[in-house]
Amino acid sequence: MRAGALLENGLHQRTCPLCEGMCGVTVAMEGGQVTTVRPNRADVWSRGHICPKGTTLGALHDDPDRLRTAMVRDGSEWKSASWDAALERLEELADGVRNRHGPHAFAAYGGNMAGKDATLSRYSGLMLATSGIQQVYSSGTVDQHPKNLSAMLMFGNEWKIPIPDLDNTDLFVIFGGNPAASKGSIFSHRDVMGAMRDLRARGGRVIVVDPVRTKTAQAADQWIGLKPGTDAAFMLGVAHVLFARDAVRLRQLDGLIEGLEPLRNLAAGFSPPEVAPFCGIEAAVIESLADELIRTDRSAIYGRIGTCTQSFGTLASWMIDVLAILTGNLDRRGGSMWSRPVASLVDMLATLPAGMPVVMGKSRVRGVPAVLGQFPASCMAEEIATPGPGQIKGLVTFAANPALSAPDSTKLAQALPLLECMVSLDNYINETTRHAHVILPSPSFLESAHYDMWSWIFCLTSGGHYSPPVIPLVDRPDHWRIVARVGAIIGGQPRADIDALDDGYFRALAAGRGIDPDTAMAALPVRGPERILDLAIRAGPFGDRFGAVEGGLTLASFEDKPDGLIIGPAIPRASEGFETASGNIEIAPALILSDIPRLKQAMAAADSALVLVSRRHLRSMNSWMHNVDTLVKGKDRCTLRMHSIDAQARGLTGGDHVNVTSASGTITVPVEIDDDIRPGVVSMPHGWGHADPRTQLAVARAHPGANTNILSPGMLVDAISGNAVLNGIPVVVHKAVTHVAQHVGEIA
Ligand SMILES: Nc1nc2c(c(=O)[nH]1)N[C@H]1C(S)=C(S)[C@@H](COP(=O)(O)OP(=O)(O)OC[C@H]3O[C@@H](n4cnc5c(=O)[nH]c(N)nc54)[C@H](O)[C@@H]3O)O[C@H]1N2
Ligand SMILES: Nc1nc2c(c(=O)[nH]1)N[C@H]1C(S)=C(S)[C@@H](COP(=O)(O)OP(=O)(O)OC[C@H]3O[C@@H](n4cnc5c(=O)[nH]c(N)nc54)[C@H](O)[C@@H]3O)O[C@H]1N2
Ligand code: SF4
Ligand SMILES: [Mo]
């Protein structure tokens, strides 16, 4: 932390860390207290855009339930402990696991906030490396893993994900994303909805493909309400028409595409009349989208959670980029482009070491492969609960709440208490961390220096915003030392020299970026997260490369820019080449094509079951912001939304309580009748189910809702990526006559 940067009173310009919107906010402080958090209109990126969550940064800091000290559990009672005492307790438990079960009995689970936490985003890589943990799970496999896999196979890098150039396009097509609630994901934009309005004002069009007529779809020109899980077939139908009309235009990618013929042959078997019944729409809708793509000069096709967390997640994620290629809109202004982040984080979090095969090993219980170095999150419960050599006995969670956010919550709730050593790097005692033996919280966002290395990776503007902490940290060690120490303890070297470990890590990061480690060490002697950030900026595409590039950026370039710094828009990058075997873009990777027979099988099977999808709300953030009173007050948002046709068939009226049952469990929730949803589809928000009395979340417990992931069977995964299927889950719904367990606390 930089001395002198702390000004307890006055106005502090920061970036809201809560989502990828990266809104600039002004935090007003008086007497060491946050008085207001307002939009910062001078922020060069967000220009005053904000949402209700951003104004709660002060409330999050002041939340009495936010942990400020290390916590150690004694039976069912939590006690505040000194950092040394908590680490000693961890050492005792970890030694026990290692002695009884060997070094490979540990696993780790990283969550969504790990990319945003100033320390974890830069130090979880060191922690994992030092710990020797081989079984790494993360929220990535309940999120974007299919996109990582398709990007890896097509472009040679799991994070080389094309991003829609919404500001310069003529046609924006969204599959399974609702930026009106989420603000955009794997797509950082200052204001997606505003940019959609601008696009329409300049004569362009927006099409939303989603089983639900979301707020985003309501703001579009056209809503295509297809059946869940059918996007890949739908897009293959579009590709079929492009080939059949001889309308494939590779343009700037001519000569850079391998596998076009196999793709043409494949698409031949997906004519619109063949796929339309499966998708639950008219064949003419597919044809007209294809025609519109042919007619329109610049189109940007984008897919998000609805295309990833479904049965054919990899096929759908792949087809998004295939359509961009076939219409000549990949790597092109107004199409989809790759970003050029000032400071890149992904190699610090990456779990796949260079040279490792994309698919490797088999999980012990279910026998599914690790894809890109990760076993599916859906496997973790059985790996903890099933006895035998290799059973998980020790677990590190960091910034994750899988008890609510991962599938098969009932099984996970039964498995977590079996762990002999569980440590959570987390700021709350919640549904997951309550099972831990030791919790080690991070400083709050206002106590940490912030630079959103994560969200800039998904942004077609290159820029950055550094903000120093506004509230001083007192009486606690640098958090990065704690995180590094956790790795050392799990790895069986509790007395390891943390400075030496950090220097070794830093040198490796420098060398990995083609920087001489001695030069980097000499230029940046002060250890910690900001040293790593400075290295990433200096070694990045606009960096000074430690003096080699005159006028290049360093962290200091941002320190006198409280409103941020914009470098400029993305530029085409295909000429830089691809890390695939051919050196070109692989449009038809064999692993992806191997899943086509499964899609054909699904198309052949008539399926009329009621299916469940998930939804998000602007005032929630996954599972963890329900403890902020201003965000949860008002009417209950944890409802089952259902079309009136389906409600009538079951004799239901709005507000009735219903039992929703899937292959993995039952929950009871109020029903909300909503004709903006496709008949045959019902929707639930995730991240609720806070009634467990063993958590310390007073506000959330007063607004508990039910945990929809009790209904997500862990066996349902996208066959090739292993990603969880959280959308398109068959369910039955009945009027509730009996109370059913609502939360893990009633089950465990
Ligand atoms: N049914 C269904 N399930 C879903 C989804 C869905 O659409 N439907 N979406 C999935 C997706 S996309 C994701 S990303 C996952 C998210 O899954 P998770 O990442 O497991 O869940 P979060 O609710 O984001 O949990 C964030 C955790 O970080 C902690 N935390 C918050 N701030 C900090 C901090 O600054 N430092 C530290 N150390 N901890 C902090 C919180 O206390 C909480 O425990 O959920 C997935 N689950
Ligand atoms: N306010 C808020 N913002 C968030 C989050 C949050 O919880 N709250 N979470 C953050 C995270 S971790 C993420 S990953 C992003 C997610 O960002 P988005 O993907 O934009 O989020 P969702 O609102 O879940 O939108 C998914 C949409 O997919 C639709 N869908 C479901 N099944 C299918 C299908 O089979 N095909 C198609 N085409 N559509 C389908 C759903 O109806 C839903 O409208 O949001 C981030 N931002
Ligand atoms: S949109 Fe995202 S970044 Fe902006 S204020 Fe809301 S939560 Fe924060
Ligand atoms: Mo996510």
Image: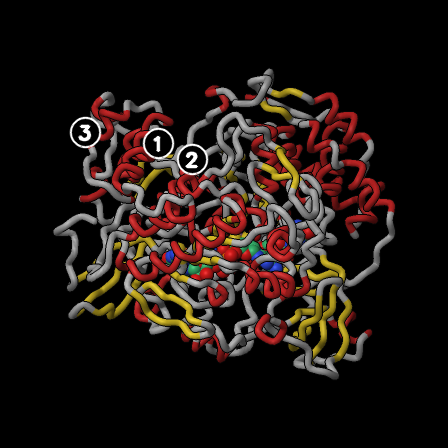
Q: Answer whether labels 2 and 1 touch (C-beta < 8 Å).
A: yes
The alpha-carbon separation of the residues under discs 2 and 3 comes to 22 Å
Question: From what the image shows, is residue 473 above or below residue 131?
Answer: below
Which residue is pictured at 74% across the width and 69% down the height? 661
Within 10 Å of disc 2 (Cα), the crowding (few <14, some 14-19, many 20+) is: some
Q: Residue furthest left?
A: 4
Within 10 Å of disc 1 (Cα), the crowding (few <14, some 14-19, many 20+) is: many
Question: From what the image shows, is residue 574 above or below residue 225?
Answer: above
Q: Which residue does the numbered mark 1 point to in the structure image?
A: 509
The alpha-carbon separation of the residues under discs 2 and 1 comes to 8 Å
Q: Answer whether labels 3 and 1 touch (C-beta < 8 Å).
A: no
- Front residue of 426/591: it is 426
Determine which quarter of the picture holds residue 660.
bottom right
x and y, in percent, of residue 582 in the image: 59, 17
- Residue 347 numbered mark, or none: 2
The amino acid at mark 2 is: Asp
- Front residue of 52/418: it is 418
Dot 1 falls on a residue whose secondary structure is helix
x and y, in percent, of residue 662 in the image: 74, 64
Q: Quadrant of the C terminus?
A: bottom right
Q: Which residue does the numbered mark 3 point to in the structure image?
A: 522
- Front residue of 69/246: it is 69
